[in-house]
Amino acid sequence: MNLTPERVVTERNWVAERVETVVPIINDVRDDLGETFDTDVDHVTEAQYLEEVDAVFADGDLAVNVAAMVAILRGLDVEGDYPGFVVDEILGRELAATISGTQPLRTLGEATFHYADLRVHGDGDENAGVDDCEAALAAGFQERIPGWNWTERESPFGVE
């Protein structure tokens, strides 16, 4: 794989074009996790998602890594799928973590990827890695976008 600035733009555009697929996944995950943790979690809009896509891809060092993982997942297919499911899980988890940012959001992105991945199943004509890519995008971007009560307050553990 050769990653050029042009290829990063191509992958960014693909991620942005998934808005109608990824945003509903984000909101379904937020609804379910909010219910599980007895909290209200704001829904994400398509505009918020696209704004964060732009933010991720505006950071060149982050963009090239996200683009590489997206490109690999988009192209990943394994005959019979099951033998290759570990690699798409590893790449999906890492993509979600990379998009999410620093700790603790990074780890939450990884955990949320596995939760989202259970809910996302690609079309039969898509490569096996595409649904993992979509789950990773949902998990990573939902961590970046405000809406969780605990991220809206100042931590009581900060030391001055």
Image (cartoon, rainbow, N blue to C red):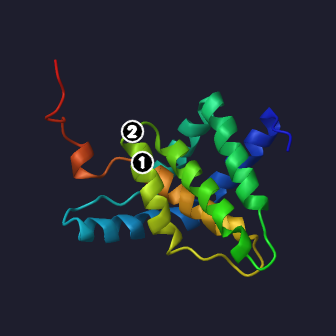
Mark 2 highlights which residue? 103
Q: Mark 1, residues whose alpha carbon is within 10 Å: few (<14), some, or many (≥20)?
A: some
Q: Which mark is residue 107?
A: 1
Instruction: Name the element at disc 2.
Output: loop
Judge by depth and name the residue closer to the eye, 96 or 147: 96
Residue 61 quadrant: top right
- When the figure is inspected, residue 156 is found, relative to residue 34, above or below; the finding is above
Kindly identify the residue that appears in the image at 66 percent across and 39 percent down. Answer: 65
Kindly identify the residue that appears in the image at 48 percent across and 64 percent down. Answer: 114
Residue 10 point in image, percent of width and height: 77, 46
Residue 6 point in image, percent of width and height: 81, 37
- When the figure is inspected, residue 40 is found, relative to residue 118, above or below; the finding is above
Judge by depth and name the residue closer to the eye, 93 or 122: 93
Q: Is 61 on the left-hand or right-hand side of 119?
A: right
Question: How many circles with numbers are drawn on the protein?
Answer: 2
Residue 24 point in image, percent of width and height: 48, 68
